Amino acid sequence: MQQYVYRWAARVAHRLPLVSGKLGRSLAGRRRAAGHWVDWAARHRTTAPLVWVHGASVGEALTAQPVVARLRSTLRDVQVIHTHTSPSVERWPAPLLAEATDYAPLDEPESVARVLDALRPSLLAFSRGDLWPELVTAAHARGVPVAVLGATVRPGSRRRHPILRPLYAAVHGAVSWLGAVSASDGSRWAELGVPRDAVEVTGDPRHDHVLERVTRVQPLGSLLPWAECGPTMVAGSTEPADHPILLAAARTVLSEHPHARLLLVPHDPSRRALSRLRRRWRRGGLDVVSWPETDPGPQCRVVAVSARGLLYDLYALGWVAYVGGGFRAGRLHSVVEPAAYGLPVAVGPAWQDTADAASLVEWGGVTPLPRRGAAQALACVWRRWIADEDERRRAGLAARRALDAGAAAKTARALLRLLAIAGGEAEGSERGPGRVPCGAPHAAAPSAPPTARR
């Protein structure tokens, strides 16, 4: 019964008139995706094992990166394709370790069957937990192992609601292996129907990604001398709800510390959003320079970044960090990037549902702001970190220590076992001499074929 309800709802949603914005772009991309994947398979599919990785947005895709790198270092001829649902992946400038990247097909029986029959995947891997019911059940019915890597589910997730839980029971029951970020995440997935013997606590592969990534200095250009002029706070992935708090705190701190500066990296860096931000901040008493359109001089106090894909590198310029999204439950963005640089981090009050933030708070590397008086609290902690170098370093080192490497290697070993069970490893998979172990660092992986974007 639940399956029929889902199919009816999906068909209705997929046939609604296209709307503007991200939802409209996502739906348009998914409507075209089945044809694109069938065409790609006809031209590029070989007899080698194929791993289909679904990472809904940029964060999920990056979580899978170190795992894919380890698979490639062991299975030299493996093919990897990546699907997504967020338009942000289309504009992501950094290459992903996949032969092709495109939208996931509509989650309807016909579209899913066309793509599965064309691609003939050896393994279907979901990053984080964005499981699509038709895709999972159809892959399972074809004998394709279904895995979830870096799996997490919030305590308040809607899928745990008593009415919705039965809808997902068959989907979760079809999972062959799940690598949970934490023991509590693993327990919640088991409660949702994933077989308990399929759940393994691995940690978060995203930690491996940030710990192994090399900072790209060249794209930062004119920001390098600007940031060297004084103590810089990097405010990453900021949402509209964060900006009034940051504006009020910046007015206080920048007036007291003439060399301090703020680097804003909005989650939405579109021209329209940045123009709105600059107008509001100018009315609030602070001018904002947009980079890279304008080279900021030493006199500039606030710079907003319009370029995408540079946030990890930009944290290298900071003394301290603020991570946006923490004023709405479930919206806090990743705190692991600034932690990898040893920066102390401030976040909004809605951090409890985010495993990384909870861990960093426990270690002392993240300072949560209260809902009331958030701007004053941010100004206070910002001033304290500028004035007290020892405290700033202690908090930054605590944030760095909270990150745990090794999840990518554990995950890759589990996926290799699934590929062996499915016959992908045993039948004709070409390895290089000596066979590089799964735990080899990201940098040691051979270069992947160029990403095909459609």
Image (cartoon, helix red, strand yellow):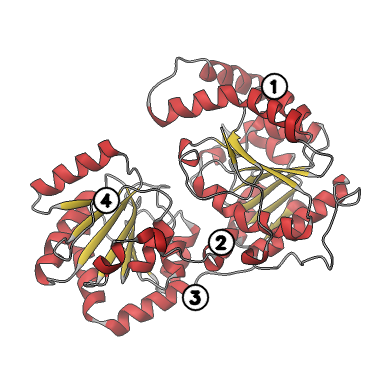
> First in sequence: mark 4 or mark 1?
1
At a point 47% along the width and 35% down the height, the residue shown is 87
Asked whether disc 1 touches disc 3, contact meaning CB atoms under 8 Å apart, the reply is no
Q: Secondary structure at mark 3?
A: helix
Residue at numbered disc 3: 401
Q: Earlier in the sequence, mark 4 or mark 2?
A: 2
Instruction: Answer yes or no: is residue 144 visible.
Output: yes
- Of labels 4 and 3, earlier in sequence is 4
Amino acid, disc 2: His
**Residue type indicated by callout 1:** Pro
Tell which residue pokes out farthest to the bottom in this image. 390
User: How far apart are the two marked residues, 2 and 3, measured between alpha carbons?
Assistant: 15 Å
- In this view of the protein, which residue sits in the foreground, 296 or 437? 296
Q: CA distance from mark 2 to mark 1?
A: 34 Å
Question: Horizontal and vertical percent for residue 220?
Answer: 36, 60
Q: CA distance from mark 1 to mark 3?
A: 46 Å
Q: Residue at x 77, y 49 (%)?
A: 78
**Split into 4 quadrants, where in the image is the C terminus?**
top right
Q: Secondary structure at mark 2?
A: helix
Asked if residue 451 lies left or right of residue 121, the reply is: left
Circle 4 Cα neighbour tier, 10 Å, few/some/many (<14 / 14–19 / ≥20): many
Image depth: mark 4 or mark 2 in front: 2
Looking at the rendered structure, the kind of residue marked 3 is: Arg
Rendered position, 272 above or below 347: above
Q: Which residue is mark 4?
A: 242
> Label 1, on which residue?
109
**Three-letter code for the amino acid on which mark 4 is drawn:** Asp
> For mark 2, what is the residue?
209
Residue 398 in percent (x, y) is at 43, 76
Looking at the image, tell me whether mark 1 or mark 3 is earlier in sequence order: 1
